[in-house]
Amino acid sequence: MTVTRPTTGAVGPAEACRAVAVLALVALAALIPLLGPSAALHGTGEAAAPGVGGIALLRTVLFAALCVPVGELFVNRLARRLPGAPTGTPRSWAAYAATAGFLAALALASVVATGNRVPHSVSELSRIDIGGLYGTRDGVLALLEVNAFVVAGLCALSRRPAHQAWPLAAVVVAEALRAHPPTEHGPLTGSGLTLVHLTCAALWVGALSHTLRTLRLWRAGGSGGEAGAALLGLYARVAVVLLAAITATGVCSTLRRMPADTVLHQLTETSYGRAVLAKVILAAAVALLALWARIRLSRAPDPMSACVPARVEVLLLAAVVALSGLLTALPLPIRW
């Protein structure tokens, strides 16, 4: 059975409300990296690098741009495994995400090209040394991310969108290497933890969002009730594994940054620790919502009622992504 999308040119009230809700969500999520640094740094005695809010916002956009296509590829693959499921899929956002990721990566690369200083005027833009990017490790990684998003966007517009997986994997690898410079103790271990953490997080966030979009499309077409519940069940089983991997790698990464005998103090007395604590609280709330959705999916008369807590879960996951972007811009805690 094929589900087709109506081709009317008018935008209905429901679509308009969803568009307004998405814009409001984006605006609220942007407040976390923009206002978060001052709140996290207050009273800690730490000094953040200039432009930390802008860097955090760019990292948030980059992470979100990674989640969207990864989730689409994963959920579309799950949907093809369901026998008798509708063949319709929501309109892809991958090309738009690649464009946003490219712009964010390009802006971050320009910061690296100016010696990690955020340009504040047109005259300062002349200091950008694009050629110098090839001579530094951070510069090469920044250029890799820029080119990877370009290739991902071209793949999204091609007849083989599944090929996006390769450039998107390159972005994940580049982020994992960037977060752990060679001067760090055990950089390969840290990069490995970040690689698994970021991959699982992108799958969790992006797949849940695209799953809900797919279910809405199937239900709008008047079909896919049983298939929708089956798809949500498939995602829920995978999400359990993803949550376990995210939790394990997150704990290990935190203990690498903040040793066990100082972690409780640093969670409240350092900006990095405060951001980690906020992320843990949100992640715990997300886990509870996921459990609630799973209970509804297996016990409620209408399994599709699990979509209600799942939608709230998406909202909280957007805040978690924003906090992740903030974490990358805050000063690292001192190993006491």
Image (cartoon, helix red, strand yellow):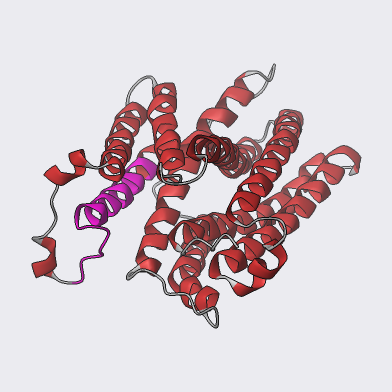
Q: Residue at x 37, y 29 (%)?
A: 167
Q: Is residue 10 visible?
A: no
Residue 118 appears left or right of 310: left
**Residue lying farthest front?**
336
**In-front residue for pair 180/318:** 180
Residue 286 placed where, x, y %? 71, 54
Q: Quadrant of the N terminus?
A: top right
* Place of residue 229 in the rendered image (x, y in percent of width and height, measured from the top left): 76, 34
Quarter placement of the C terminus: bottom right
Q: Which residues are magenta?
A: 97-120
Residue 138 found in image quarter:
top left
The answer to whether 192 is drawn above or below residue 256 in the figure is above
Residue 244 is drawn in which quadrant?
top right
Task: Specify whether 109 is left or right of 236.
Answer: left
Image height of 257 relative to 138, above or below: below
Query: Does the segment drawn in magenta span residue 100?
Result: yes
